[in-house]
Amino acid sequence: MENRESIKELRIKKGLTQQQLADETGITIRTIQRIENNEVKPSLYSLNALGRALDTNFSESIPKTDKKPYEFNFNLKITDMNQFINDVKILVKNHWKVLLIIVLAVWLASSYTDIKAGIMDGWNGK
């Protein structure tokens, strides 16, 4: 049984309306409706709050994965990349002066200590 089905079933068995469950968990009624209608996947926070309110533990039904929590997949369509490249071309064409100033400012800021040391060495005749 999926979480959304067990949430709805447990809520009804406990005699709670969606509004009462929302009040008890601090989750909006619209979010509870979306979870029960399978429009959204509940977050871990929502599952824990719902589990406390319905006297159950939903963490057992969460599939375990080998992925670390900070891993993510980055999928980009070629058409999106082409649009991105065209947008960058237009940006550079229309605002190249501003971009040049930003790049120079970043370079100067990151090289400040080297530039300062060179000026001081030249000033002192080293």
Image (cartoon, rainbow, N blue to C red):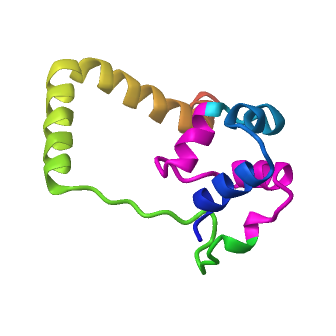
Above or below: residue 67 compared with residue 111: below
Residue at left offset 62%, top offset 41%: 32
Q: Position of residue 89 (x, y in %)?
A: 15, 34
Query: Is 58 included in the stretch rendered in magenta?
Result: yes
Segment colored magenta:
30-59
Above or below: residue 57 compared with residue 28: below
Residue at left offset 70%, top offset 55%: 44
Residue at left offset 79%, top offset 48%: 49
Depth check, front residue: 89 or 60: 60
Q: Position of residue 53 (x, y in %)?
A: 84, 48
Q: Position of residue 112 (x, y in %)?
A: 58, 33
Res 27 seen here: yes
Q: Residue furthest bottom?
A: 66
Depth check, front residue: 125 or 113: 113
Q: Quadrant of the C terminus?
A: top right
Res 45 seen here: no
Q: Is residue 9 left or right of residue 99?
A: right
Query: Is 116 included in the stretch rendered in magenta?
Result: no
Depth check, front residue: 96 or 52: 52
Q: Is residue 78 left or right of residue 42?
A: left
Q: How many marks?
A: 0
Q: Quadrant of the N terminus?
A: bottom right
Q: Main secondary structure of the magenta part?
A: helix
Residue at left offset 31%, top offset 18%: 98
Q: Position of residue 78 (x, y in %)?
A: 16, 56
Q: Residue 121, located in which quarter of the rendered image?
A: top right
